[in-house]
Amino acid sequence: MSKKVRVRFAPSPTGPLHMGGVRTALYNYLFAKKNNGDFILRIEDTDEKRFVPGATEYIINALKWCGIEPNEGESYGGEYGPYTQSQRLKMYAPYAQELVDNGHAYYAFDTADDLNVVRDQAKEMGLANWQYNAITRSSMKNSTTLSKEIVAEKIANGDPYTVRMKMPRNQEVKFHDDIRGWITVNTNNLDDKVLLKETGMPTYHLANIIDDHTMNITHVIRGEEWLPSAPLHVLLYEAFGWESPAFSHLPLILRPDGKGKLSKRDGDKLGFPVFPIDWMSAEGEKYSGYKEGGYFPEAFINMLALLGWNPGDNQELFSLDELVNLFSLERVGKSGARFDPDKTKWFNQQYLRAKSDIALAELIIADNLVPADTDKNHLAIVCSLMKERATFLQDIITDGDYFFNDIESYDEKTLKKKWKEQTPAIMEDLISTLEGIEDFNTASIEAAFSALLSEKELGFGQVGPGFRLLVTGKGAGPSMFDICSALGKDKVLDRMKTGLVKINAIKA
């Protein structure tokens, strides 16, 4: 009987969750749901120096907003907890000791000053990247060069030490990546990584392997940046005598110009968010999020899913359930995926258009974009007219401000190009025509307008722009007949009469 699929998203709380991290979480979520498995959130906070207060809460809130919540993990509970590494510290040292005892690791007593001296000497000799490895360890202060008595004495005296992996010499490490195929690395290219720090805190490598094993993780789906660490992790599994999980390393998300990885610093600098929700740093610096930028979570997730994965056809819009049904690691690419901020806006636009008018009205009211007492049904009518031109909910209110406010100004370009000498007289005729309509609706307004054009032998361009300018103050927008029907006869006529006076004054 095959094991139940268990995957984990294991971010470090060193700052806000970048959209690349969200995509990693999403692919883990999709894979777990597709295979009726578990999706676990684990917080890997062994990097004490880079820990940022509030980052863990941010990660949890971000995943909630995205709609890809774990079913087990930090803040969710489960039988394999605790799910934050700093709460699991007592379990790591015995495993490190086991590696030392079975010859796969060793104690290293070199101080930071010792290491700096060696690195400086290597630079002077033209060796820029000195490594603590199978060759250099023989000249360092560790349990492979010191006698057992000296090692025991140092430990008994409380001398600080680290535990390092004893990387085998000239050994081929071969493992399969479910995205990239077979990968082979020679251990001569690997250094003796620290597994346990002087403080007793495990490094990422040791804690990660132990936690994945003890939490029964079956598949490790993580970013490409961890690919260089995979050979070490494979060797650690072998050293413990444990079965390794299946590995998948996701491609990078690239900057819009394709030049390099999209970083946390690229967001506001390039004019688009790179975080799911807003983040305020301890220094008071704000980093913009997709949520506060007006994006729908489902549009954000849809966009992220296609940054590295493709469904095999031209479909671009997917519900989360559809993504679960279609997702497979076989269709995740190896090459970096270029992020397109304009395409991201397009996704949001499609999701906005697909929502019902009443649903949009409710969202606008809930987001406090209009006063709480705004008539929802009237707002729904406005949404029906404006949503085809809108990308964000705010656009409906901003571009359709004339539905809610009096006209304060008139589009200068339209006023200059379309308001002719004869326009005021034509508008007077139109006002008289509209005053004669009893049932003021879209069809009757259009019929009266068409009749006026025919009677006066006028083209639409001689009447339409001035009509729109007086009623909305703008040079473009939805059908004027629909706008007038939504505003009502009294408001339309009042605006036209008032607007004529104002524009005549401007033109005088």
Image: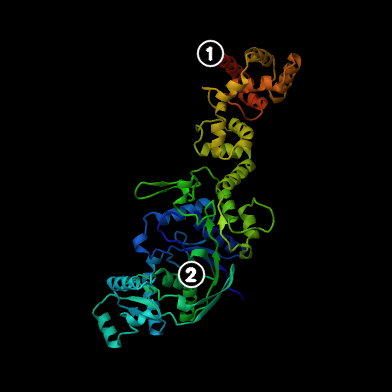
Which residue was labeled with disc 2? 228
Nearer the observer, 268 or 287: 268
Q: Nearer the viewer, residue 182 or 235?
A: 182
- Indicate the position of residue 424 as horizontal and vertical percent values: 62, 13
* Residue at x-position 36% and y-position 73%: 196
Q: Secondary structure at mark 1?
A: helix
Residue 11 falls left or right of residue 121: right
- Measure the C-alpha gap from mark 1 to mark 2: 72 Å
Q: State if disc 2 and disc 1 touch (CB < 8 Å).
A: no
Badge 1, how many Cα within 10 Å: few under 14, some, many 20+? few
The answer to whether residue 223 is visible is no
Indicate the amino acid at tag 2.
Pro
Foreground residue, 78 or 283?
Answer: 283
Relative to 172, is 426 on the left or the right?
right
Q: Secondary structure at mark 2?
A: helix
Q: How many numbered tags mark residues here?
A: 2
Q: Position of residue 351 (x, y in %)?
A: 61, 45
The quadrant in which residue 110 appears is: bottom left
**Vertical side of 8 occupied by 22: above or below:** above
| Above or below, comparing residue 409 to residue 143 in the picture | above
How busy is the neighbourhood of tag 2: few (under 14 within 10 Å), some, or many (20 plus)? few
What residue is rendered at 34% in x and 79% in y? 107
Quadrant where the C terminus is found in the figure: top right
Q: Amino acid at mark 1?
A: Ala
What's the residue at 56%, 59% (across, down)?
A: 336
Image point 36% across, 46% down: which residue?
284
Residue at which label 1 appears? 505
- On the image, the x and y values in percent for residue 432 come to 67, 12
Residue 376 at what x, y percent from top left?
Answer: 57, 33
Would residue 145 be found to the left or right of residue 179 on screen? left
